Amino acid sequence: MKKFPIGKQDFKNIIENNYVYIDKTKYIYELAKNGVPIFISRPRRFGKSLTVSTLFYLFSGEKELFKNTYIYDKWEWEKYPIIRLSMAQIDITNEETIKETLKYQILSIYEENNIEPDTENLKMLFWTLIKKLSSKKDVVILIDEYDRPILNHINDGKAESIRNILKEFYVIIKEADQYIKFAFMTGITKLTKTGIFSTLNNLRDITTNKNYSQMMGVTQNELEYYFQDFISETSKELNIDNEKLLEKIKENYNGFSFDGKNFVYNPFSILHFFQDKEFKNYWIETGTPQYLSEYIKKHKIQLEDITNKYIDESKLTTYEIENAPPIIYLIQSGYLTFKDKKEYLGFLVDYPNREVKESMSELLLEETFNISEENLKQNIIISLQNKNIEKVIEEIKTIFNKILYNLFQEKESWYHSIILTIFWACGLKAKAEVPGNLGKSDIELEFENDIYIIELKKDKPEKSIQQIKQKEYSEKYKKSITIIGIEIDTTKRNITNYIIEKL
């Protein structure tokens, strides 16, 4: 069996050392053959660096590396001069270290090509390098993670000055267009109309283009084809059949969409899952950027602000990332995704999957409300296992008591969102506004063989119980059903009464 390329971003290394490689060269071919400068943004650990590496070996003319891929017999295997830069390797401490380490990368390419630099100016070094390398053939430019220096300074006020440094550097890609065969740039955040894109308006942004929506990430077909042996092996170890295993993998790691129609798995989580054969939150827990935690704390983000909302695509290129509304920041970072696309309304935004939903809910509790879920999760899970729903409600009341008064809202929906956040942070399968025969329930929680239907009102809990019964929310279930009517008091900012009935 092939090895898992965890932490591997070099195409040649993956091919030559028997690692799993999902053939994405059909997309590479379509991009490269046209020669149009390309930009694409994707969340971290989604295959951006591997794509850049693949393009590097393609334009290096290393045909035999591509022997078993789509592009092998379609490409003219010529060798081109390449300028490959990674902003992930830049010292991002401050403006000066950024300029110095970027200059170091440029000078190393001078040295590799036996070219003597004739200036110390960063911008002119880049320009001159392109011009001199193009003396025999046009140049290929590959820039990975263009925005890394900016993202690491979005909370300290330095983002704009760093953007200006990069903007002045990147503009050379447009100014030297006559010497360039192909240019490809990746990042986490989209280029905005007034930022770097204003000087790089010759780049074609394919971030939300449906034709490239599955270029990065793992599709359902790719999962079942490239990982078929691992699926069988894992199903045996976990003692569940392939079909149920695939359903669970999908629930946990699928759901990312960049066009609102086509969906992919997070490759990082998929590789780790098949290696460990355990359902864990790999992507977010093995590298939540510090700036994300700081951002959530600074903006006091709550569930109601960011999920189940429509957003116009133009908004994604309107704001610089440090000034963007939280929903835009979280979309571009991958913590939210597009679940649908509607004419006039735009993209429907929500969490991509259970992995992200659970981890983000933990972060919201910790950073917005300063609540640790360390004991909360254990207490709620044990209470549910013991079918002690009274204890679950008392745990929720304890959480409300810990929330600062200035974060409270009077709307019933706000209380719904906090309870959902608590359930999701505990890794529970909970849904809001679930359609029934005659209406929508507030919250439905499924745990093992039990269904809990919860209705919250400012009125007495009897009214909530009555509504659950009248609207026939429970009719669709064949499992054990418990209905819960909860009274909330916005003056006391907590649950003041509740009724529990077993159907």
Image (cartoon, helix red, strand yellow):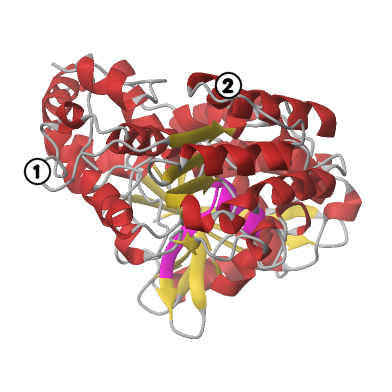
Are the residues flagged by discs 1 and 2 in contact, CB closer than 8 Å?
no
Give the alpha-carbon distance from disc 1 to disc 2, as whole Å: 33 Å
* Residue in view at x 58 percent, y 68 percent: 464
User: Which is more foreground, mark 1 or mark 2?
Assistant: 2
Q: Which mark is residue 108?
A: 2
Question: What x and y, as percent, mark residue 98?
Answer: 75, 31
> Which SS class for mark 2?
helix
* Residue in view at x 63 percent, y 63 percent: 456
> Which SS class for mark 1?
loop
| Image: 204 above or below 276 | below
Mark 1, residue position: 73
Q: Which mark is residue 81?
A: none
Would you identify the image quadrant in which residue 12 lies? top left
Assess whether residue 331 is covered by the magenta stretch.
Answer: yes
Would you identify the image quadrant in which residue 237 lies? top left
Q: Looking at this rendering, what residue extends furthest in the bottom direction?
A: 344
* Residue in view at x 13 percent, y 48 percent: 74
Question: What x and y, as percent, mark residue 227?
Answer: 17, 30
Q: Nearer the viewer, residue 320 or 103?
A: 103
Q: Which residues are magenta?
A: 328-340
Q: Quadrant of the C terminus?
A: bottom left
Question: What x and y, as percent, mark residue 238?
Answer: 22, 21
The answer to whether residue 94 is visible is no
Badge 1: how crowded within 10 Å, few (<14), some, or many (20+)? few
